[in-house]
Image (cartoon, rainbow, N blue to C red):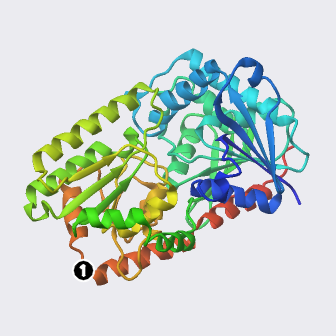
Amino acid sequence: MARLIVVSNRVATPTETKGSAGGLAVGVFGALKDAGGVWFGWSGDVVSETVANAGPTLVEEGHVTFATAGLTRKDYDQYYRGFSNATLWPVFHYRNDLARYERDEYAGYRRVNAWLAHKLVKLIQPDDMIWVHDYHLIPFAEALRSEGVRNRIGFFLHIPFPSPQVLQTIPPHDELVRSLCCYDLLGFQTRNDQQAFHDYIVRTARGTVREHGENKESGDVEAYGRKLRTGVYRIGVFPDEIAAQAAGYESRQHVLDLKQSLEGRKLIMSVDRLDYSKGLVERFHAFEQLLEHSPEWRGKATLVQIAPPTRSDVASYKVIREELEREAGRINGRYSGLDYTPIRYLSQQYDRWKLMSLFRESQVGYVTPLHDGMNLVAKEYVAAQNPEDPGVLVLSIFAGAAAELTGALLVNPHDAAGMSEALGRALSMPLEERKTRYLTNMEALRRNDLGVWRDRFLTDLAAVPHPL
């Protein structure tokens, strides 16, 4: 049986894969355990050149080898903090106004991809399948091909793929798409993302696309002298595992403390990384409108926003954190009472299973990104609910999950009044309607769980004709 090699920007540790890691890490590790193989990528450490240039650190866990390498400060600044997160991330999330392009950062991005690929080559066996993840590693297959690797290589993009007009704001856009065409299979979260890539191939790269399948969610692409396939693979969660874990935490002290502190108030839960793509400020403004225009909810509903800091050394992230803290303080100053704080804003990391138990205790899940590839928080919120008394998901139409979770109240995050009305409706929704919406969403989660996503992608990659 062919081994699987997973390549990602960060590699979960063996300890994390046993329970504390996110759903993606658990799903990928499951595939690795089944097939045997290697998980390769950055260790997360910034190290000296001497340490970086040594061979990758190898840790064995059963049939899985965890292979990691550290980055030098220069590589971290150019590859990760620079081109990946100051150029690709904002543009792919349609925030060109926040993007910065520097030629030396792009050169560093390609250099690190080539350097990592060179380290991996020594670990590759002839029949291995290679599965590369996300925007940090777009040139990775091209670098492997230049090293003579002819294995099947697939790529999955976890974030949106922008329209051609938006992508073209990145000066080396043509080189990036050319690099993507060195993969054998490209996976996208949604049909819209796949269509945006196809549009670029036809309109800009002068290539050809042949879409097939009932929903045209797979396609054959020919461009830049390469043939490849594309597909839509909706990443999911393991809903029944989340439900069991969330139920098991109901008697834990943190849940009891939360219930006591709420004093019977309804709870709106919101969990996101601190990022401008998540629409956090817009979310606060909509909640403020609820309190302003529906005074019956003053003192009766509390918003808990958990937003762990991320990429704190990128300037735009410092700005969003300061703005969020300022708006939370302003709204609380306007509507707080001696025994009531409308917004509880927590800028810290929480254990994943603790979050699932908090989701279960809430009446509303508030997930309203301005643009998102999928958004697993929305799926985790639904899965964590008590089937006998489920909460209501308020979800942005710009989250990839919106196409599946049709039982949610869908909102436009640019419409504060509309979001405010949806919050009011969710808080007062009758039990029977809540149950119906919950069952609709759970059916979708079970139909496309994390295992289905993983197995579909790997089956399609294995079916690709072997590269010459």
Tell me the residue at 71%/51% (across/down). 14
Task: Provide the secondary structure element on which disc 1 rests.
Answer: loop
Query: Which x, y percent locates residue 19?
Result: 62, 59
**Res. 364 visible in picture:** no
What residue sits 20% from the left and 41% below the top? 329
Q: Which residue is mark 1?
A: 430
Nearer-the-camera pick, 341 or 429: 341
Would residue 144 appear left or right of 316 to someone viewing this image?
right
Q: Residues within 10 Å of mark 1 (few under 14, many from 20)?
A: few
The picture places residue 10, in percent across and down from the top left corner, at 64, 40
Occupied quadrant, residue 166:
top left
- Between 329 and 453, which is closer to the camera in this rendering? 329
12 over 446 or under it: above or below: above
Which residue appears at 81% of the width and 25% of the height? 54
Task: Tell me: residue 204, above or below residue 446.
Answer: above
Which amino acid does the dot numbered 1 rest on? Pro
How far across and how far down the image is residue 398, in percent? 39, 52
Q: Nearer the viewer, residue 388 or 139?
A: 388
The image quadrant that residue 388 belongs to is bottom left
Is 152 on the left-hand or right-hand side of 445?
right
Q: Quadrant of the N terminus?
A: bottom right
Q: Is 390 drawn above or below residue 153 in the view shown?
A: below
Task: Spot the residue most to the right.
Answer: 126
